[in-house]
Image (tube, rainbow, N blue to C red):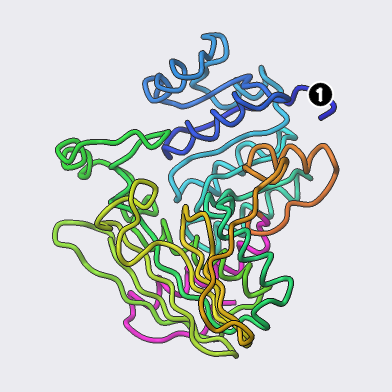
Amino acid sequence: MKKPWRVVGVNFDHMHMGDLLREVHDHAGAEIVGICDARRERMNGAIAALGIAEDRVFTDVGKCLDATRPDLIILCPATADHASAVEEVAGHGAAILVEKPFAASLADADRMIAAVDKAGVRLAINWPLAWYPPHVTTKRLIDEGTIGDVIEVHFYDGNRGPLYHLADKVEVSDEEVRRAKPTSWWYKAASGGGSLLDYLGYGATLGTWFMDGRAPLTVTSVVDRPEGLEVDEHSITVCRYATGLSKFETRWGTFTDPWTLQPQPKCGFVVVGTEGTISSYDYDDHVGLQTRAHPQVRDIPVDVLKAPFRKPVEYVLHCIDAGTPIEGPLDPRLCRTAQRIIDTAALSAREGRTLELLP
């Protein structure tokens, strides 16, 4: 890296802001020059954990960006606010890293792409699953032709619920979750809440990555309708591709959190190709590989990720430094194909019928 990169974090709606700021804090070539949220108290945890000086704490976005002149802006607003947040900061000339999901709708995704294109800045969408060694290893094996052409992707993922953990996976009690649910944006339809919007993006984005960018023809989705809640906690989406059917299932309410103890069903992917299959489960130290030459499933050790391809902050800063494009699951244009799947799935669930993929 040619210089110490200046990074700010704006909006603490999503608990992953703390994790992303920790990456900046631990990065030898970057520093946190500012954090900003309209509610000062929401930044207290990061201030204490990362030793952020008071003169780097702001409650006004414009003042924060004018004073800090960042190279990279990390955004973690509620899903429904992603488009307006990107539009607000794009003109300041810094690259933008938005924590997943991409957007609450395809229209919002297009607003985000238009805003950064107009400003001439980079946009990256962070999907934490994109940095899991088993999934990176799976993509390498696919690209090497190990299982032939990908014809199916099966995805099941989620956790006990978004209110059960804070930054750094600090656990929250059942009683605290019960009290927080009525007012949390995660459970508000207008804010883009629900397991479908939270987790289908993971499956659809990495699934599109595994499929080398191919899009499905039709989408069918069903969601549960929990009593007293505005949003779903469980969804199943079936996508019909030219090669066959793929399934993407999202769940708030898994028996255990996968980062603590994998639930059943296990969280992750099973990818089917013309010449073999790969099971790729979150947090595993191996993938399961089956091929025509070796039909018995073999455990293949996962790749060791190396800098600058281990985490989102170091990757985006590397792309800025090297002048290379944002690629893979972080690429907004690949994410847009996934957003088409998500929008079609949400509409399918509302209308109770199979739909052609939205354009």
Which residue lies under the disc numbered 1? 3
Q: Main secondary structure of the magenta part?
A: helix
How crowded pointer 1 is (Cα within 10 Å; few <14, some 14-19, many 20+) is rated as few
Q: Quadrant of residue 330?
A: bottom right
Residue at x 51% of width, y 65% of height: 280
Q: Quadrant of residue 172?
A: top left
Position above or below: 62 against 209? above
Per the image, label 1 sits on a secondary structure element best described as loop
Could you tell whether 291 is left or right of 77 in the image? right
Residue 17: x %, y % from top left: 49, 34
Q: Quadrant of residue 316?
A: top right
Q: Nearer the viewer, residue 90 or 205?
A: 205
Residue 236: x %, y % from top left: 36, 74
Residue 291: x %, y % from top left: 60, 82
Residue 44: x %, y % from top left: 40, 19
Position above or below: 210 against 115? below
Could you tell whether 211 is left or right of 280 in the image? right
Q: Nearer the viewer, residue 38 or 95?
A: 95
Amino acid type, callout 1: Lys
The C terminus - image quarter: bottom right
Magenta-colored span: 331-359
The N terminus - image quarter: top right
Residue at x 58% of width, y 48% of height: 126
Position above or below: 110 against 90? below
Residue at x 45% of width, y 50% of height: 79
